[in-house]
DNA sequence: TAGATTGTTAATCGATTAACAATC
DNA sequence: TAGATTGTTAATCGATTAACAATC
């Protein structure tokens, strides 16, 4: 806890991909993998993979490679997937509902306790067991339910107001922000942005300018 | 057209952010901006900004800075936002509907001509004027309507099958993929992934390991 | 003209790749 | 033991920052 962020962001962003492929291998019943084979799957070089993993410890064995189950668990632990998180979603439109509905997040330990909205037509509805509540109740709800992650799926106009409620609650440690806006938050709160606009514009750049690109 | 991808991916991924802030400045009626001021807004260094922009031409003026309107238009042109694109969405669940509903994409020139699904309960419904059609009709629809961009919002199990239809249509030039899977496509087709899982796991990493992180 | 700020080159920093000794 | 593959160091490559002459 609270140790320094010593490992670079570029390394961190590759970990989830390792985790995904290791999970797939696990499901297939494969119990051994070399950095070279992982390289073929992920597209990263074998050298890079070994170096990435060695930031966190020596999980492999010379002459053998890596044990899939062990490595999957270790990478999961590094990513903080060895526990559950309570979350709430602010903004109950299609995007909010899509996130609430996504089984994959729940399986990974991210529990959506409630959605929130200010639209009276939505308040009271249920999305897969999860109720949509009045956003005015959100701050108290966060306090009462040990919510650590706040998800913003509102229009950009409301994003900072929502962030301010998260901050005020003094419980939210991380914000997953889908609004195309850069939030102002105190340093101890982590923000991860999903800027769909930026992703789409990158696609259109490559459409116009290049023949070859993937990822 | 078809020129080489000479500018690095890291530069390209910063362009949409410039574009967004320039748009905001434009709306505010500000017509002049220095690299230093842009630096404050975007968080990139002034030096980096000047170097990024000079990959594409000298848009500034010594002693003055950049004209907001001119730079906004130029960056938009670089990103391929100076024209319209026809798109279709495969997968008409919440996520597909969210993308179809998002006004921001339409404003940027990305027209959703149709959604597709294989669920008979969804086929025939309309999302904001846009009809959900049987996925079996998708390939022909793409051909008949000059669709260049295919959007995948299906479960990961179906993602490659959808990609294969896009490929077979011989019209799709770019795929915007929301499924947590890496698609196999021929080299001339561009794939831009939105891997929400990876984004969420990155957030949880920083929650566990670090106090300070933003973006 | 003087002040400001770009465009661009050079210096630094960090990330990736290559190589190989260690060792299972 | 011989073969394989890691962990780790050194070499390369690329991206960022610093600096400043050019010039509006």
Image (cartoon, coloured by chain):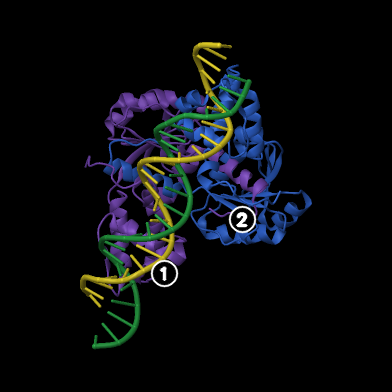
Chain colours: A purple, B blue, C yellow, D green
The residue shown at (39%, 58%) is A18
Judged left or right of residue A171, residue B152 is right
Closer to us: A77 or A6: A6
The chain to which mark 1 is attached is: A
Lower position in the chain sequence, tag 2 or tag 1:
1
Q: Which mark is residue A212?
A: 2
Judged left or right of residue A57, residue A92 is right
- Asked if B190 appears above or below A98 in the picture, the reply is below
Question: Which secondary structure, mark 1?
Answer: helix
Location of residue A202 in the rendering, given as x and y in whole percent from the top left corner = 58, 43
Location of residue B93 in the rendering, given as x and y in whole percent from the top left corner = 56, 46
Location of residue A16 in the rendering, given as x and y in whole percent from the top left corner = 39, 53
Query: Which quadrant of the view contains residue B137?
Result: bottom right
* Mark 2 neighbour density, 10 Å: few (under 14) some (14–19) many (20 or more): some
Residue annotated with mark 1: A37
Closer to us: C17 or B42: C17
Q: Which mark is residue B186?
A: none
The residue shown at (27%, 49%) is A83
**Can residue B108 be seen at all in this image of the molecule?**
no
- Asked if B23 appears above or below A79 in the picture, the reply is above
- Asked if A197 appears above or below C21 in the picture, the reply is above
- Asked if A150 appears above or below B114 in the picture, the reply is above
Nearest to the eye among marks 2 and 1: give it.
Answer: 2
> Please, which residue is most extreme toward the right here?
B144
**Can residue A38 be seen at all in this image of the molecule?**
yes
* Mark 1 neighbour density, 10 Å: few (under 14) some (14–19) many (20 or more): some
Gap between marks 2 and 1, in whole Å? Answer: 24 Å
Question: Which secondary structure, mark 2?
Answer: loop
Location of residue A56 in the rendering, given as x and y in whole percent from the top left corner = 27, 55
Position of the N terminus of chain A, as image quadrant, is: top left
Tell me, yes or no, whether dots 2 and 1 are on the same chain.
Answer: yes
């Amino acid at each position: 806890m609270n140790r320094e962020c010593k490992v670079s962001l570029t390394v961190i962003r590759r970990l989830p991909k390792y985790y995904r492929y290791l999970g797939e291998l696990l499901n297939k019943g494969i119990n051994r993998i070399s950095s070279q084979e992982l390289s073929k799957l992920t597209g990263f070089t074998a050298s890079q993979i070994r170096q990435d993993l060695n930031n966190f410890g020596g999980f492999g064995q010379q002459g053998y490679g890596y044990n899939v189950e062990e490595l999957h668990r270790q990478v999961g632990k590094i990513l903080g997937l060895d526990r559950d998180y309570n979350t709430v979603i602010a903004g109950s439109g299609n995007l909010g509902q899509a996130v609430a509905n996504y089984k994959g997040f729940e399986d990974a330990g991210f529990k959506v306790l409630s959605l929130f909205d200010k639209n009276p037509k939505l308040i009271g509805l249920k999305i897969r067991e999860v109720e949509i509540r009045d956003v005015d109740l959100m701050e108290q709800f966060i306090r009462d339910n040990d919510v650590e992650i706040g998800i913003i799926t509102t229009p950009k106009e409301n994003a900072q107001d929502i962030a301010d409620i998260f901050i005020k609650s003094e419980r939210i440690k991380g914000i997953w922000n889908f609004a195309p806006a850069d939030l102002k938050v105190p340093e101890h709160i982590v923000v991860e942005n999903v800027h769909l606009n930026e992703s789409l514009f990158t696609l259109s750049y490559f459409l116009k300018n290049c023949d070859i690109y993937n990822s």
